[in-house]
Amino acid sequence: MKVNGTPTRTIWLAADGWAVEIIDQTKLPHDFAITRLESMADAARAIKDMLVRGAPLIGATAAYGMALAMRADASDGNLQAAHDALYATRPTAVNLRWALAAMMEALRPLPPAQRAEAAYARAAALCDEDVEINYAIGTHGLHIFRQVWQKKPQGERLNVLTHCNAGWLATVDWGTALAPIYRFFDEGLPIHVWVDETRPRNQGASLTAWELNQHGVPHTVIPDNVGGHLMQHGMVDLCIVGTDRTTASGDVCNKIGTYLKALAAHDNGVPFHVALPSPTIDWTIDDGVRDIPIEERSAEEVTRMTGRTDDGRIETVTITPEGSPAGNWGFDVTPAKYVTGLITERGACPATKAGLKALFPENA
Ligand code: MRU
């Protein structure tokens, strides 16, 4: 996607050919800052502190973290240590496990002297695959968007609601849930996006709004509790979100609050779609509520907020009374029965075991 008109990915090799550069997403939307990762520990910190976030980008960063580790010390011991350190960064997005497994599979059989070069090549290939996958999700999603739009009175815009950031910033390029939005917009078709602010870290207000703005897509940021009201009044034609882990039977784990949007969509007959690259499917589990580990983060993310003052300073303020505890669960699970359809790189399917099995017979 373009940043100030320049095509940009979210992760790339620095000009020196070995360090890795990322966009520091904790600084957006106020500052577009690039951060250099020089070690496995830098990559792990970038994931844990959410300089990079979003399931596919977490996987891509971990892959490059393995390459940085192999450049420093390609022994068997460090291979396993790097895997374990990166694996421990965030618990919910299964792409992390998937990317690390792909790296281990490529590197373990090699003699240490060949591992660094092979690791960089595999990490680059994973990134390119992510871009291809997301472009294909965009193609399949575009078809669904067109179908919904064609049922509207002629000339009306398509109103789409999304939660969190499942856009370009959450992947290497294109995004998952936002890929069909970009494709619909690029076709010159009329679209408007309701952007859930996504408390407590505000990925919608800070990141989705920023990237839609960069691309020129009409949008409106709304507090998280507005969506149900909009759906009751016919102001949402479809919802589309990403996912951090989808079970083999189609339960969808995504940013906290997704479940409530799915319930509201169900109650109002609004289609609720989930866009997912296949590395986000966890084929080892069926019951998302029971089996998906839900990340719990610092209470400070709830009790404090950061923003820009009118005179341009970035400040953090406390919004709760001193002494009030806060709870911060990062994700929730939307049971498959509330999901209208899954949009993958191989096409769309019902959120069922049979639906996923038909698209991915080799995994099921
Ligand atoms: O905590 P985050 O910002 O990493 O959460 C991201 C999400 O929940 C996204 O919706 C999900 O990773 C899908 S991204 C294509």
Image (spheres, rainbow, N blue to C red):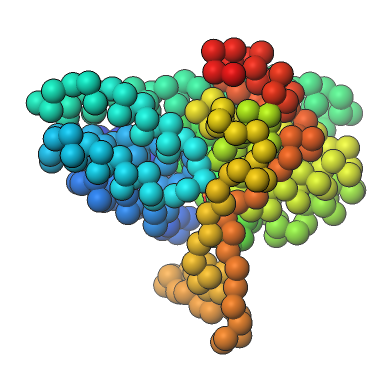
Front position in the image: 321 or 286: 286
Residue at (57, 86) in percent of width and height: 323
- Tell me if residue 215 comes above or below residue 107 in the rendering: below
Is residue 6 visible in the rendered image? The answer is no
**Which quadrant of the figure shows ligand 1?**
top right
Residue 256, image x, y percentages = 64, 53
314 displayed left or right of 148: left
Q: Is residue 186 above or below residue 338?
A: above
Tally of numbered discs:
0
User: For this rendering, which residue is in front, 293 or 2?
Assistant: 293
Rendering quarter of residue 107: top left
The residue shown at (25%, 51%) is 41
Tell whether 315 sits left or right of 185: left
Left or right of 59 on screen, residue 268: right
Where is residue 160? Give x, y as percent: 73, 39
Name the residue: 83% across, 37% down. Answer: 270
Q: Quadrant of residue 267?
A: top right
For the C terminus, which image quadrant? top right
At which x and y percent is residue 225?
Answer: 75, 59
Residue at the far left: name it: 113
Q: Nearer the viewer, residue 337 or 232?
A: 337
Vertical placement of residue 258 versus 183, above or below: below
Could you say where residue 185 lies in the image, as x and y percent from the top left?
Answer: 63, 30
Looking at the image, which residue is at 65% across and 21% down? Answer: 356
Res. 207 in view: yes
